[in-house]
């Protein structure tokens, strides 16, 4: 497999951290060109700090980290401390990061990278609200045709929403940004709640990660224990859903996932359903497909991949 060049745009977040760990543990397949922090689960100052903590945990203190948008494009910020804790990465005490962020703004990093690398070679991996990518598209519309693929965790359709009955958090936080991205013409792969709700961090699966016995594995187990407590209560399940690593797992093993190309529009007006991803699964609208929407995942295969890779860190 040829190495894929990727940019990770993220709001860590324990599940973002798991995704970043999976990416750094897979250097044969993935070349991480840079990581961008965006305001999301918690304010930007925390997501930037958390991102650097994760890089250092993965032994990547030289990874280029950029700070992006401080708030959504059109709305006041909504955060999710009730899920992720006050810092966004509660669950285990880790040293404050030593590494610094790069001076360049994340939006400019995204634009320059897409312009400098050969067209069709850079994949955008988004694990949070789409604010940075939308701002980049507004500033430099030419980048849309240069992206190889944008693989995102966001949205939900058959499963409904998780922050409101209709909306998934990443889209709800900045629906106008999502609208810009889905209208951009970039090839999009969407990992909605329909997929991530099949990926429960059951005791048996987490025990396998714990059995690796390494420091990064232990930290991940502590993060997952904190992260799942909210969802266990909400869903009454054995473990909570693991969202963001689906994006990286797709790059490594696309055969774990199945879905179909369809049209996705974003609701930005209705007070009741703002942030909803309106997926035309049955192709009844006549609107042109603009995304591959995943619906099924091989859950055991996914956790086997995650566990094996985390063991390499
Ligand atoms: C998404 O929202 C965040 O809380 C998670 O990190 C994930 O990206 C799930 O709705
Ligand atoms: Ca996230």
Image (tube, rainbow, N blue to C red):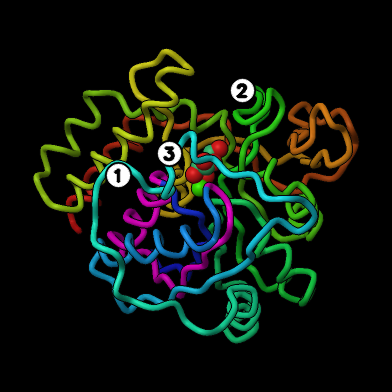
Residue at horizontal 33%, vertical 34%?
226
> To which residue does mark 1 refer?
306
Q: Considering depth in this image, is 61 or 313 the residue closer to the camera?
A: 61
Does residue 215 appear to the left or right of 67 in the view shown?
left
Mark with earlier residue (1, 2) = 2
Q: Check disc 2: other Cα within 10 Å, few if <14, some if 14-19, many if 20+.
A: some
What range of the chain is rendered magenta?
14-41
Q: Considering depth in this image, is 94 or 219 the residue closer to the camera?
A: 94
Check whether the beta carbons of the residues at disc 2 and disc 3 lie within 8 A of each other. no
> To which residue does mark 2 refer?
159
The circle drawn on residue 157 is none
Mark with earlier residue (2, 3) = 2
> To which residue does mark 3 refer?
256
Does residue 30 appear to the left or right of 195 in the view shown?
left
Q: Residue 150 lies in what quarter of the image?
A: bottom right
Q: How far from the left and from the top, in percent, is residue 15?
A: 41, 44
Residue at horizontal 51%, vertical 54%?
11
Q: How far from the left and from the top, in percent, is residue 197?
A: 49, 27
Residue depth check, mark 2 versus mark 3: number of the one nearer the observer: 2
SS under mark 2: loop
């Amino acid at each position: 497999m040829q190495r894929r060049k990727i940019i990770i745009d993220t709001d860590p977040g324990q599940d973002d951290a798991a995704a970043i760990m999976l990416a750094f543990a897979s250097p044969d397949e993935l070349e991480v060109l840079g990581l961008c922090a965006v305001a999301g689960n918690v304010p930007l100052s925390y997501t930037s700090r958390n991102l650097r903590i994760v890089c250092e945990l993965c032994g990547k203190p030289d990874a280029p980290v950029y700070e992006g948008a401080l708030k959504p494009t059109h709305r006041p910020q909504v955060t999710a401390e009730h899920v992720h804790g006050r810092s966004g990465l509660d669950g285990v005490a880790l040293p404050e990061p030593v590494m610094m962020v790069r001076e360049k703004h994340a939006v400019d990093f995204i634009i320059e990278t897409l312009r400098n690398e050969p067209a069709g070679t850079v994949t955008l991996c988004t694990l949070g609200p789409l604010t940075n990518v939308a701002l980049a598209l507004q500033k430099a519309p030419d980048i849309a045709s240069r992206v190889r693929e944008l693989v995102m965790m966001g949205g939900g359709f058959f499963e409904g929403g998780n922050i409101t009955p209709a909306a998934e958090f990443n889209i709800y936080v900045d629906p106008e940004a999502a609208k810009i991205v889905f209208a951009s013409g970039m090839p999009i792969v969407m990992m909605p709640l329909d997929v991530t709700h099949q990926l429960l961090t059951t005791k048996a699966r987490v025990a396998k990660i714990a059995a690796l016995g390494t420091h990064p594995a232990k930290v991940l187990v502590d993060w997952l224990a904190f992260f799942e407590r909210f969802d266990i209560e909400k869903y009454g399940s054995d473990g909570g859903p693991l969202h963001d690593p689906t994006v990286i797992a797709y790059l490594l093993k696309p055969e774990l996932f199945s879905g179909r190309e369809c049209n996705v529009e974003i609701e930005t007006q209705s007070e009741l359903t703002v942030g909803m991803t309106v997926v035309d699964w049955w192709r009844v609208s006549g609107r042109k497909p603009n995304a591959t929407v995943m619906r099924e995942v091989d859950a055991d295969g996914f956790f086997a991949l995650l566990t094996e890779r985390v063991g390499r860190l």
